[in-house]
Amino acid sequence: MKTSVSRKRGMVIVIVLFALTSSLIFAGFLMNRSVKQGYEKIITRERTQLELLCHAAIEIAKLKIKAAPTELYTAFRFKLDEPAATRTSALYDAFLADLRLEVLDPELTSESVPMTARVTAIERLGITKKGTGLSNGYVEDYLRITASASSQLASFSGGKGLKNDVVMQVTMQITKLERQ
């Protein structure tokens, strides 16, 4: 009878150790999953903020083009249409330099990460003569605006930095009166 009681005690110890080990493995799995979900949440939030910054940069470019189209077309003329000896991209570069956004407020940046967005290129795709419209002499000009945004999470997840980049393009149509 003594041997059956000691066997039962030995079996209880094995069962308790097995349950404890299983619980620890399960807790470790849940903890690892929770950390990964937190990491993905930060990445998703960061990406969404960068996409919104790109949209803002594109909208600023559209507003500037609509407000001062002569400035852009003068920049295009000096960059593309002038003779090779007098070509310069200084006006074009100055036009693009104004189209830069930086998030400086630490409350607006996730994890206090500096984020920037800028318009990297405005391309002139072409002009088509408008067959129908208000009157003769109007043309449609197509422009492609490319914007990019980036951020850098320093020392995240084991000392590795996380760089996040977003690039967006939009094509816009401008109807204007052609000079005769």
Image: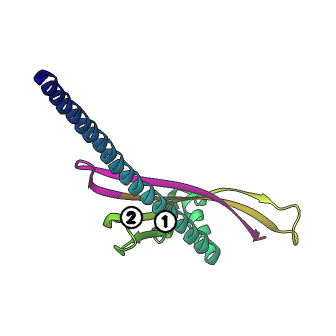
CA–CA distance between discs 1 and 2? 9 Å
SS state under label 1: helix
Q: Residue furthest left?
A: 2
Out of 160 and 2, give the one closest to the viewer. 2
- Residue 63 is situated, as x and y percent measured from the top left of the image, at 60, 74
Q: Give the residues in magenta.
A: 152-178
Residue identifier under label 1: 53
Residue 153, disc:
none
Residue 128 horizontal side relative to residue 42, left or right: right
Residue identifier under label 2: 115
Q: Answer with mark 1 or mark 2, whichever residue precedes in sequence.
A: 1
Q: How many residues crowd around disc 1 within 10 Å: few (fewer than 14), some, or many (20 or more)? A: many
- The structure residue drawn at horizontal position 36% and vertical position 75%, both measured from the top left corner, is 105
The answer to whether the residues at label 1 and label 2 have Cβ atoms under 8 Å apart is yes
Q: Amino acid at mark 2?
A: Met
Out of 78 and 97, give the one closest to the viewer. 97
Residue 34 horizontal side relative to residue 173, left or right: left
SS state under label 2: strand
